[in-house]
Amino acid sequence: MRGNREYYERVRRESKENIAETLPTIVLDVSAAILIWLFGRLIFVPIAEGIYFLNYPLPQILNFIIVVALAVIVLRVLVDVRRIIDGVAGYAACQIGAPYEISPEEVEHYRTALRGIFNIIVVSLVYLLFVGYLTRIHPGLSGVVLLAIVVWSFYQIWRVVQAVSAEIRRYTSQWAEKL
């Protein structure tokens, strides 16, 4: 049991450090992404309606430029979000598991489940940030990206269920042995 307490404390400490290091960067980068999105959506693209640049519609060119700028920022954010998700998942798993003296393997199952759920939420929000611009570049582009996200989300859900089902199987077998 002593080893488990040390494990919980180490995971909690690492989780808190991850959160403290990455949260300010995420807030600043998300603010920049939101400002780019707002200026692009509300100012630059509407101004460019009906204007052509070398026989190409300027709104489509601007949408592409905005998507590239957002992609650069979002990729930076996703790296940090992954770290913060690991931190939050680790901290939450320890908070959930510590009172019940669960094993490190169980904590990892809970972390996997929480990571999967958080990842689906984050990717869905990122898609919402890009969908308007992708549709203006080409309507099929947003559909292809959405299909890829749906397939990936189903895989993530499957991983979450597998992590949770491992714990359910273990608890069920323990309960059956007691009977």
Image (cartoon, rainbow, N blue to C red):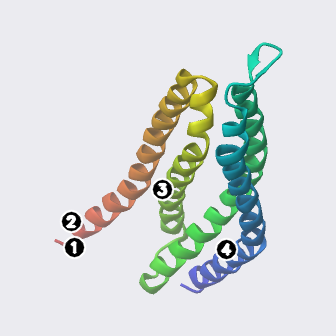
Query: At label 3, which amino acid type do we have?
Result: Ile
Locate residue 108: give its quadrant.
bottom right
Q: Is residue 153 left or right of residue 13?
A: left
Q: Which residue in the protein does label 2 denote? A: 176
Q: Between residues 48 and 25, which one lies in front from this camera angle?
A: 48
Q: CA gap, disc 2 to disc 4?
A: 35 Å
Q: Which numbered disc, 3 or 2, marks the residue closer to the eye?
A: 3
Q: Which kind of residue does numbered mark 4 sit on?
A: Ser
Choose mark 4 or mark 1, whichever is in front.
Answer: 4
Q: Residue at x 32, y 58 (%)?
A: 169
Please report the residue visible at 73 percent of the width from the left and 41 percent of the height from the top. 44
Residue 25 % position (x, y): 78, 66
- Specify which label sits upstream in the sequence, 3 or 2: 3
- Quarter placement of the C terminus: bottom left
Above-or-below relation of 66 to 1: above
Q: Circle 3: is it few (<14), some (14-19), or many (20+) Cα within 10 Å?
A: some
- Residue type at mark 2 is Ala
Comparing labels 3 and 1, the label whose residue is closer to the camera: 3
Residue highlighted by disc 4? 15
| Mark 3 vs mark 2, CA separation in Å | 30 Å
The residue carrying mark 3 is: 117
Q: Earlier in the sequence, mark 4 or mark 1?
A: 4
Element under label 3? Answer: helix
Q: Which residue is mark 1?
A: 178
Q: Position of residue 7 (x, y in %)?
A: 63, 77
